[in-house]
Image (tube, rainbow, N blue to C red):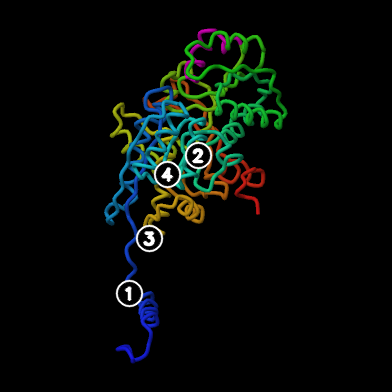
Amino acid sequence: MRNALGGQSLATVVGVALLTCSMSCPVLAQDKTVKIGVLTDQSGLYQDLGGAGSTLAAEMAAEDSGLRAKGWKIEVISGDHQNKPDIGVNLARQWLDVDKVDVVADINNSSVALAVNNVAREKNAVHLNSGAASTDLTNAQCSPNTVHWTYDTYMLAHSTGKALVKAGSDSWFFLTADYAFGSALERDATAIIKESGGKVVGGVKHPLNTSDFSSFLLQAQASKAKIIGLANAGGDTTNAIKQAAEFGIIAGGQKLAAMLLFITDVKSIGLQTAQGLNLTETFYWDLNDKTRAFSDRFAKRMRKGSPPTMTHAGVYGGLLHYFKALEAMGGNPHDGAKVVAKMKTMPTDDPLFGPGAIEANGRAIHPAYLFEVKKPSESKGPWDLYKLVGTTPADQAFLPIAQSTCALLKK
């Protein structure tokens, strides 16, 4: 008996209907929900350079993306990794498994970042790092789920170290924070110092967040090195600089090179002590009209009225690009590797870093700036702390892709 379809099979009719709809029916709306987890130091020595400012930067990126006005639901949460990898990993797992977080952002500690890097890959989330410095994030431990946005140890060493050696500061002694970040920074700085014709005459490692640098500074002083390189950050750097002044090290003819120094550090140290220091950053609030406009909005919402650090800027810039990628994809696939792949196909361009790109190993490239800390007499305001000495173009500031050891580059 013939059926009511005139002999045509049901499967054929359904197939034709689906084909017709694929060409003319509206596409079902994709998921437009996003959850951002800002994992940062909220209570320790890195809280000023990350902390509440990183959470604010993430919220401002969500606001400025324009997606909420288009019906997207974007939520920003935050947590304190306390500079401990186990705490950072446990919190990240909770966020990704239970709270359905899509992106883990900031992570301003290299040991924590490298540990969370593995979790993000395992759970196929996005790891958008703006606070850690280790180049391992785009080399030995690179991941298809990770973008390393703001700076890294190669860039810092290449800009600051090379400039100082060329200026005649060709013998170095390192005070190094005893964890992944410090080791990576000393390693990369040593390589560029030797490449530039200088030498490293010694070094000593110190515990993270130590309050007494006296024994370490005495060893550095005894080395007679022209430069005492500080391969540390945050409170460790500010304490070392302040205590070096008390020991009369600068007055004795040696110089300090802060390999990683943030504007909040300089403010804490004070211009009287910090004047003349060279440092490298990829963002400064007073670079141009766009950075000044953003920084003014940011400062008005910060409790202390402080401008953003380059870590805060990196949280903002990285997330803004992430949101652009989601919009280009038409929704959130909740597939970290797929979103990062899309981010890499799109040129980066935001008000804080300008034009750039994300390379295949996850390294975001943009210009780097060599600054000198102003003398008190040169400063025109409480946060007018730097003068620009030189600029390294985006395509020269970071490790050349041909030298990267990232497994993602292997054919």
Q: Which residue is mark 1?
A: 25
Q: Which residue is mark 3?
A: 330
Magenta region: 236-252
Q: Nearer the viewer, residue 370 or 400?
A: 400
Q: Residues within 10 Å of mark 2 (few under 14, many from 20)?
A: many
Amino acid type, callout 2: Asn
Q: Quadrant of the C terminus?
A: bottom right
Eye-nearest disc, 3 or 4: 3
Please report whichever mark, 3 or 1, sits nearer to the chain's N-terminal start: 1
Amino acid type, callout 4: Gly
**Residue at the limit of the structure toward the front, as seen here:** 1
Eye-nearest disc, 3 or 2: 2
What separation in Å lies between label 3 and label 1 (alpha carbons)? Answer: 16 Å
Give the answer, above or below, for where 247 lies relative to 358: above
Residue 312: give x, y in percent of width and height.
Answer: 40, 36
Please report whichever mark, 2 or 1, sits nearer to the chain's N-terminal start: 1
